[in-house]
Image (tube, rainbow, N blue to C red):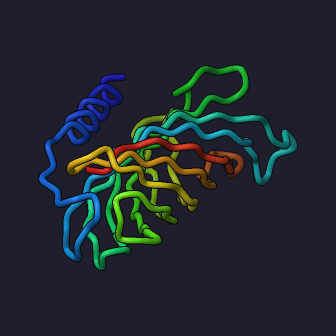
Amino acid sequence: MKTLKVITLLLITFITQRVMAQENARSKGSYFNITEFGYHMGTQRWKYSPQGGNFAQVLSLRTINGIFLTEKFSVGVGLALEGYKIPNAGFFHESAFQIFGDARYYLKNEKNTPFAYADFGHSIQINDNFLKGINMGAGVGYKFSLGGKTAFQTSLGYSQQNNKARFYNERYPTGTLKFGFLF
């Protein structure tokens, strides 16, 4: 439990940092931070188990830091903490601490614009209740200017967490809804 508190404190510290960024319409080489909150809904499936699949829900907190390689294309590195609610257990019964790469393409170099994203990374096991394995996701969203250097982003997508357990492989394919801020 102490490990979870340390990770949570590190994530909060990382997320609340002040970021010096350019305008909402970005230029090549500009730095950005995205802080997102998400809800995922889908199934929990076992590859080699007679149990089949069950409904699963996920709450997530993510932060992504990166740069714009062009005015419309950005890449970044992210950290996430995801809490999984599986049948007969509460949220965060199983969790994933993720490190991932993020790529985004904004349709226009404007303050309000649609975008597409793709993520790929790995979850690190911290204790018995933390999932480890490959995670990936993709989706589309929209960026809304809030004025100045801040924008609000919302997105819909697909996410999958793979986990190797003792006797079977778990897979969490989920639909995602995320809300976040671009600084």
The correct choice, above or below, for 135 with respect to 175 in the image is below
Quarter of the image holding residue 85?
top right
Image quarter for residue 44? top right
The percent position of residue 180, horizontal first and vertical second, equals 40, 43
Where is residue 51 shown, x and y percent of the image? 84, 39
Question: Does residue 105 appear in the picture of this structure?
Answer: no
Q: Is residue 115 left or right of residue 7?
A: right
Seen from the viewer's position, the closer of residues 150 and 30 is 150
Please indicate, yes or no, whether residue 15 appears anywhere in the rendered image.
Answer: yes
Is 72 rendered above or below residue 123? below
Return the residue nearer the eye: 131 or 60.
60
Position of residue 34 relative to residue 81, above or below, is below
| Residue 28 position in % (x across, y down) | 23, 76
Residue shown at 76% from the left, 35% from the top: 55
In which quadrant is the N terminus drawn? top left
Residue 39 higher or lower than 102, as above or below: above
Q: How many discs mark residues in the rendered view?
A: 0
Write the residue at 42% across / 71% down.
108
Place of residue 71 in the rendered image (x, y in percent of width and height, measured from the top left): 30, 75
Give the residue drawn at x 39%, y 64%. 101
Residue in the image at 71% along x and 49% along y: 168
Q: Tell me: 150 left or right of 91.
A: left
